[in-house]
Amino acid sequence: MAREPNNRGRRDRDESPEFSDRLVAINRVSKTVKGGKRFGFAALVVVGDQKGRVGFGKGKAKEVPEAIRKATEQAKRQMIRVALREGRTLHHDMEGRHGAGRVVMRTAPQGTGIIAGGPMRAVFEMLGIQDVVAKSVGSSNPYNMIRATLDGLTKEQSPRAVAQRRGKKVSDILPKRDEAPAESTQVAEEA
């Protein structure tokens, strides 16, 4: 009775159904050779768990499914973790850059939805963000837009991380929400 090698653990982890992926762009390229043209395909894929992890990958092959598979594998290897506020939006406004691509991302109140274009929308959906306002300023190349978006997301810091770095409590860093409405109601009663 022969035993199988015990490599199931790694295979199960790679093909776990917890990740969802989104095909952002597919590009057909041709190489002219003596007998005619040879076509190849380049795929750009964004992968995420919709709970704060996201990554992107690109793959090239002679066939579309193989290019998508390669891109998905690369995306799973290059995932980053992003802290989300209330599991639905960003903690603060930020800007990301890559090459000529520049993106601006802003937090949004509940119910706003994802207001962003093409490749940025794919990143936010795979990340699990539900409310965000974003604008691409500069290159509309999907590769540069995704890299700029991920650059901005890596700059995000949660209040917990800032408090820990500064040696304070989270309540000391966040603005006091109770005081502002109380003052405005007093002014309204006096008038």
Image: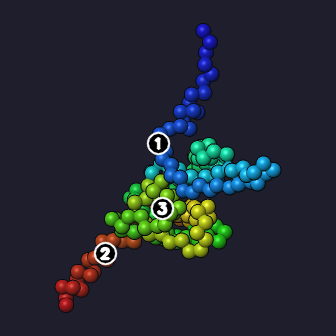
Residue topped by disc 2:
179
For the N terminus, give its image quadrant: top right
Relative placement, left or right, of 154 versus 124 is right
Viewer-proximal residue among 2 and 121: 121
Placement of 22 over or under 66, stated as above or below: below
The kind of secondary structure element at disc 3 is helix
Q: Position of residue 18 (x, y in %)?
A: 46, 42
Q: Which mark sits nearer the N-terminus, 1 or 3?
A: 1
Placement of 7 over or under 158, stated as above or below: above
Q: CA distance from mark 1 to mark 3?
A: 20 Å
Relative placement, left or right, of 112 versus 118 is left
Between marks 2 and 1 in the image, the one whose residue lies nearer the viewer: 1
In the displayed orientation, state which residue is furthest to the top: 1
Placement of 158 over or under 4, stated as above or below: below
Residue topped by disc 1:
18
- Residue at x-position 73% and y-position 52%: 37
